[in-house]
Image: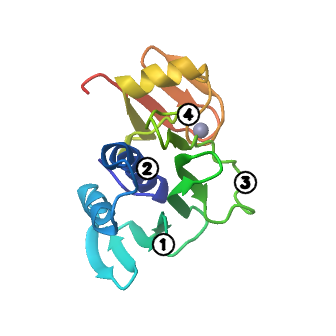
Amino acid sequence: MDVYEPIMGAFPIAKKLWRKIIENKGLPSPDAVGKMLESIGLEKLFLGKGLGVFRNNFVIALLIPRENMIAVDFVSATGDLSDALELIAYYDREIDCYVVEIIPANELEYEENLGVEPVIIDAKTFELKSYPVLGEFKQGKKTIILKVDSETYKLWKESGKLNVCPVCGGELRWRGKRAVCTDCGIEVVVDEER
Ligand SMILES: [Zn+2]
């Protein structure tokens, strides 16, 4: 798995948080989220006093656990905030669901609307109530490739939104098991192996 940009870190962590919420029947501990960040290749620099700092050469992740909420900010290691993202996982009392969301840190200035569907999990049955399209990224020769597993693909197909880019909300053009976004240029590949 490659993590060269904030989004390349946020997607796989969102997916791991989703799995962990179902497994734990609740939000995971900050330590468990720290392990997730390490598992995608980020090095733990610090964890304690209500803050975790993780990084590789390209991306810095700040883990900020709050009351009933986990927030992870992904920032480019250059310090540039234009592609920074915040990943939040929380319990939403109004809808009695756990929610995992990826939002641009600077929502107002983000020109291309992020098309990331939130993960919504029923807090009683722990059934999924949305159609998130999450996966791991790989740096291709010319494009960034999002690998989605066949289970995710199945859900995605059910949602009827196969032509919508899971990253930017733009238009996806499919050719067999591959698709390219005509807006952000990302490539989506259905990974049969898992
Ligand atoms: Zn796109």
* Mark 3 nearby-residue class (10 Å; few <14, some 14–19, many ≥20): few
The part of the image, by quadrant, that contains residue 136 is top left
Q: Secondary structure at mark 3?
A: loop
Of discs 2 and 3, which sits in the foreground? 2
Q: Give the color scheme: rainbow, by chain, secondary structure or one colour.
A: rainbow
Measuring from the top left, give residue 126's x and y in whole percent.
43, 38
- Which amino acid, by three-letter code, is at mark 1? Arg
Q: Earlier in the sequence, mark 1 or mark 2?
A: 2
Return the residue at label 1: 66
In whole angstroms, how far apart are the C-alphas of marks 2 and 3?
Answer: 22 Å
Q: Earlier in the sequence, mark 2 or mark 3?
A: 2
11, 81: nearer the viewer: 11
Q: Secondary structure at mark 2?
A: helix
Q: Earlier in the sequence, mark 4 or mark 3?
A: 3
Of discs 1 and 2, which sits in the foreground? 1
> Which quarter of the image is occupied by the C terminus?
top left
- Residue in the picture at 58% in, 40% down: 117
Q: Label 4 near label 1: C-beta < 8 Å?
A: no
Of discs 4 and 3, which sits in the foreground? 4
